Image: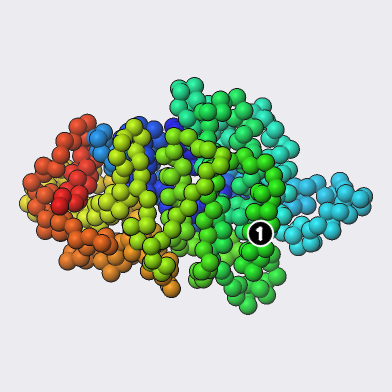
Amino acid sequence: MGYYFIGIGGSGAKAMESLAHLTAAGLMPNKEKQGGLYFMAIDPDFGNGNLNRTKAVLTCIESYQAMKAGNMTPLMKTEIKMSDPFIWSPTEQDKTLDDIMNYQVYKGNPVGKLYETLYTAKERNTMLNEGFRGRPSIGAAVMAKKVTINMCDVNDIEDDRAWKNFVKAVEQDAKAGNVARIFLAGSVFGGTGAAGMPTIARLLRRLLSSVEKNKLLIGGVMILPFFAFSPSAEEQAKGQLFASSANFLTNTKAALKYYASTENPYNAMYLIGDDVLSPVANFSVGAANQNNDAHIIDFYSALAAIDFYQKESVGRNECAYISRSEENIFQWADIPDVMMEGESSSVRVKNRFAQFARFIFGYVHLVKPVLDDLAAGRESSYKYPWFHDFIEGLDVKATEVTKFNEYAESFARWLKQLESSETSRSINFIRQSAFDAEPARVAPGQFAKLSYDEDSDVTMSELWYRLCEGDCGDKENSSGFGKFLRLLYDCCEKKN
């Protein structure tokens, strides 16, 4: 595959979601149709809303990417592969910390008494099905028990399908002469991410010890505090164990001090956080209700992964930073370009992302209503050339069509959340005023101005004209619905 991404905990899942959308937009550094991106999630909370939302996005992409859109195009150029199983948990279901640490064996002796001193009765007896409740100390104990003690080398993962498949994929890359670039994302202020970021990186070093050092690079983004929340009086009255944002800075300080004092398993580390803490609208202990909106920090975390993937090599003493030209504005001018493998010139993130946004909203505005009519069995008298050439006779209930429809809607929701994630500062990437997310639709008059800092020549009427002309570049090896999507994507390219 070449590229690997492991999202740890809720923050890791959100970074994964942003990376999935940037990948769909053609912003991975691999050449067209060469190399792919392998996704894996680590979380004891299988019902985590953010994780399941990310999984749904990846499933859509994985389903529709089999369409033949041609080779020489950014569209669908990076194959997405999801780990099997997608989610790996360091705990079994319906287990407490006492269960995992075999407390009954040590109860009453010095070890048991020390354990009782380190953890409160509530921490020891809370079911961990919904994660580690923002307690790095719980996560560290569980991870150490599972990973450090029970998974010492490749012989110990024979019955663990997720890690066995992961190691096999990396080893195959190395045997083929490729460099495997593995990137981890997680917070350092919560429970799962803070415990997993150092532990999983060391696990990878052990499991992949047979891979030549120059064939394996491990990078990671450590997400610092960027949000805060206040549990309602009702939640507090339940007496449950839950994360507290008041502890985030203390947790972060302890985590960074730990990294500074231990051997670093990473080739490259990125630290991304914010001194302006965004309020979380709906607090949740975990499970499906933990479904927080996309945030600009997720976007930057995904860009960190792309930056790592495009590096030919990584020096131990390298230090990278990113800045903004204006304190209260996030804008395209501040985002670095992406260097494609084997190329001498780079790709501007703004240009490729803006084209993809036009493509998605052109689809939901012009094409999806037609497909909805056909799916509902409504008689059509469409006379559009592009309809007769590409859509007429299409099986609109085919998996790749329905999954692309789902993806277009999810992209619009993610984009709206991203652009709305700041209240005190402006995010000037895609204009919020130009589109709605529920349902996804675009204002025709503002279509050419979707992206800030540009007035594109691709107006809605111009897009219609280009589609009817049907001549927007070579469609080698493309066919069916994929050929039409390629046509629509090419028609959304800014020409002036």
- Looking at the rendered image, the quarter that the N terminus falls into is top left
Viewer can see residue 290: no
- Judge whether 448 appears above or below 76 on screen: below
Q: Quadrant of residue 323?
A: bottom left
* Residue found 47% across the figure and 30% down from its top: 179
Q: Quadrant of residue 453?
A: bottom left
Disc 1 marks which residue? 253
The residue lying toward the viewer, choosing from 257 and 157, is 257
* Residue found 56% across the figure and 68% down from its top: 228
* Residue found 88% across the figure and 49% down from its top: 111
Q: Residues within 10 Å of mark 1 (few under 14, many from 20)?
A: few
| Left or right of 17 on screen, residue 91 | right
| Left or right of 300 on screen, residue 343 | left
The residue lying toward the viewer, choosing from 344 and 50, is 344
Residue 98 percent across, percent down from the top left: 78, 52
- Name the secondary structure under disc 1: helix
- Judge whether 109 appears above or below 297 on screen: above
- Judge whether 330 appears above or below 108 on screen: below
The residue lying toward the viewer, choosing from 177 and 401, is 177
**Mark 1 residue type:** Lys
Task: Work out which residue is located at the far right of the displayed protein and give it.
Answer: 109
Viewer can see residue 482: yes
Q: How is the image coloured?
A: rainbow
Residue 444 percent across, percent down from the top left: 18, 64
Number of residue marks: 1
* Residue found 53% across the figure and 38% down from its top: 315
The residue lying toward the viewer, choosing from 161 and 153, is 153
Residue 248 percent across, percent down from the top left: 63, 63
Residue 477 percent across, percent down from the top left: 22, 31
